[in-house]
Image (cartoon, rainbow, N blue to C red):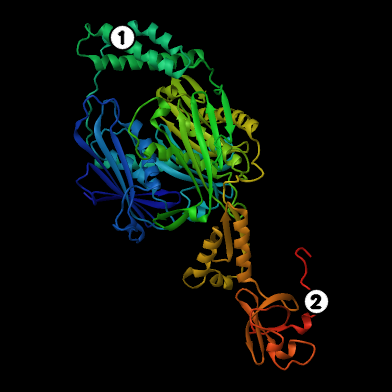
Amino acid sequence: MHKTYEVEFGGRPLRIETGRMAKQAHGSCTLTYGDTVVLVTACRQDDPVLGADFMPLTVNYQEMTYAAGKIPGGFFKREGRPTEKEVLCSRLIDRQLRPLFADGYATETQVIATVMSLDSENEPEVLGAIGASIALGISDIPFEGPTAAVRVGRIDGEFVANPSMEGMLDSDIDVIVAASENGIAMVEGGALFASEEDMVDALLFAEAEMKPILAKQNEIIADIGIEKLVPVVVEADQALVARVNDVATPRLTEALALVEKLPRYARLKVVKKEVKAELAEEFEGRDSEVSAAFGNLKASIMRTAIVDEGKRVDGRDLTTVRPITCDVGVLPRTHGSSLFTRGETQAMVIATLGTSEDEQRIDSLLGWKAKKFMLHYNFPPFCVGEAKFLRGPGRREVGHGALAERAVLKVLPGGEDFPYTVRIVSDILESNGSSSMASICGASLSLMDAGVPIKEHVAGIAMGLIKEGDKIAILSDILGDEDHIGDMDFKVAGTASGVTALQMDIKVDGVTAEVLRDALHQAKEGRLHILSEMSSSIATPRDDISEFAPRITTIQVKQEKIKDIIGPGGKVIKGIVAETGAKINIDDDGIVTIASSDEAATRAAIEIIKDITREPELNKLYLGTVRKIMDFGAFIEIFPGTDGLCHISMLAKERVGDVRDILSEGDEVLVKVIGIERDGKIRLSRKDALGEKLPEIGE
């Protein structure tokens, strides 16, 4: 049955429709906000995935080009592989949904959010997140929502819910926050050096803005009233659990006391094999249950040690950051490089400088955009001691790279001060937690090594949280093990001046604003420590860019001269490039950018362009070349492409009967400009230049 609901959201109406589109999906809804329309569907398979120890959820966010009245580019003229934005939005929706499926539910489930109409004011990501919760809520899928999401900006000091795209240009905070009725579940975004208190206030504002959306979803779910599936929860055999605990506890405790990751992992594998072998006869055919009990015991031992003793698996207390080493200039021919090592996590980060030709051109729904800064994150299998087939970047790599890019972008100089395209590549060489934050630190170091005039260093730290009853432990600089067993994954990046990027996933209820405030302030202490370590390696950008980087020089020419530099069919500019080897770009405002790693080539290109665009000056001397002789005078080229007439009466102080008595074609002759007509014609005089000489360069 077609039903329509409406709720005010961010000061504007949000319309929700069910029962009109995609009625064969297990759950579907259409959300309309302004002229932006998003269809969200939820479907499941009939049978659960046997033996699954995870939630088999797939989320796909897709933007159809017809939504903005466009036809796709390329040969095939249809949507292809997901764009980076689509991947990031899919991850964002997934992260808020995944913890909220009922225990025991392990059936293949898919959520698809399709942007079907897009105006130039209302972003669709938040609608996709809200619609996913509604579609699951009105289906028979055992989803324990609802959840809501909102984008928060701060414009002129005031928080704004779901600001317009144009309004976001003036915002110094941009975060998307998702929450359930039990509190905040997910945060993704950045800020322009905001304080920790400002970020907490933004989260509290978001939580308040989402309450009407959560209430409306409860109303919709109750109104539609679909009965939920009841997953079969297999209760653990307490006798088996007790035996595993008896046999494994002392050995696990011993193994977990090993500080280094690889020896610890190797010992844990041995202990697991020993326990399974020892209990094989007693619990024949129940290998998976023994493995599950072993994993739960391992997590319990680690969590108990943290909350009761303040002791972590690598021996640190809760706030200590692992030892850091920062090396710069590691690679001889790259433009900038750094090797950042924090504990057993290591990133080789390389900065490469390019010209405007190297900008990334993005075909978005709202038109083409040029991207001058890119940060790409790679996670090869050897960084965790594995052998796997190398594939292209997955969702995780795209997400980590985007987070690091958002953090570092805030410190980059503007294009008018630094007209380079910059690409950062972070290759993770070792990983034991917090590799995305290591990428941020390494990026900052490599930029300074490349001579990029960034404002200050930016660093990142990954925080964790363990909650056992009323006991809460906040962990600084978490390990991979702590990430897996923790209740909150909380990444904060910024400078000494404030926060530039924030990402948070909360898996449990009861994380209050006070806990978030404490976590942010503890993260700040860790970040300041890391910044200090980075500054001891390189504190300010190098005085000059690498000798292997292109030298970019910009000159301004009059707009009417652009056509002269380009020439018919690009002939002139192609000739300059062929002659000098320099890259040349001209924008519509007459700014000419010349780039080359060869300084002599740059100078040569500049001189050619100056010659082409040079304009004559009245009463100035020029050494010209006679190009054509007429009975009434001579046409003399005073610089390439520009000539003037020297009348026969202006050739000499005495009367001249024949021009050829004084000049021949090809002669070099000193002349003075004595007139410039309105139509651009130039009058020259050899007579007035007699006895004169050209000024020396620099005079």
* CA distance separating discs 2 and 1: 102 Å
**Residue 423, above or below 669:** above
Identify the residue at horizontal 59%, vertical 44% (top origin).
Answer: 411
Residue 211 x, y percent position in the rendering:
42, 40
Instruction: Tell me, for residue 692, which label it has, or none.
Output: 2
Which quadrant holds residue 262? top left
Asked if 347 appears above or below 668 in the picture, the reply is above
Residue 663 appears in the rendering = yes
Q: Nearer the viewer, mark 2 or mark 1?
A: 2
Residue at horizontal 77 percent and vertical 87 percent from the top: 652
Residue 413, disc? none
Q: Nearer the viewer, residue 41 or 445?
A: 445
Farthest left residue? 46
Tell me the element at label 2: loop
* Camera sees residue 204: no
Q: Marks 2 and 1: CB-CB under 8 Å?
A: no
Q: Earlier in the sequence, mark 2 or mark 1?
A: 1
Residue underneath mark 1 = 275
- Judge left or right: residue 170 versus residue 296: right
Point out residue 221 in the picture as x, y percentages from the top left corner: 29, 40
Q: Amino acid at mark 1?
A: Val
Which class describes the residues within 10 Å of circle 2: few (<14), some (14-19), or many (20+)?
A: few
Spot occupied by residue 159 in the image (x, y as percentages of width and height)? 53, 46
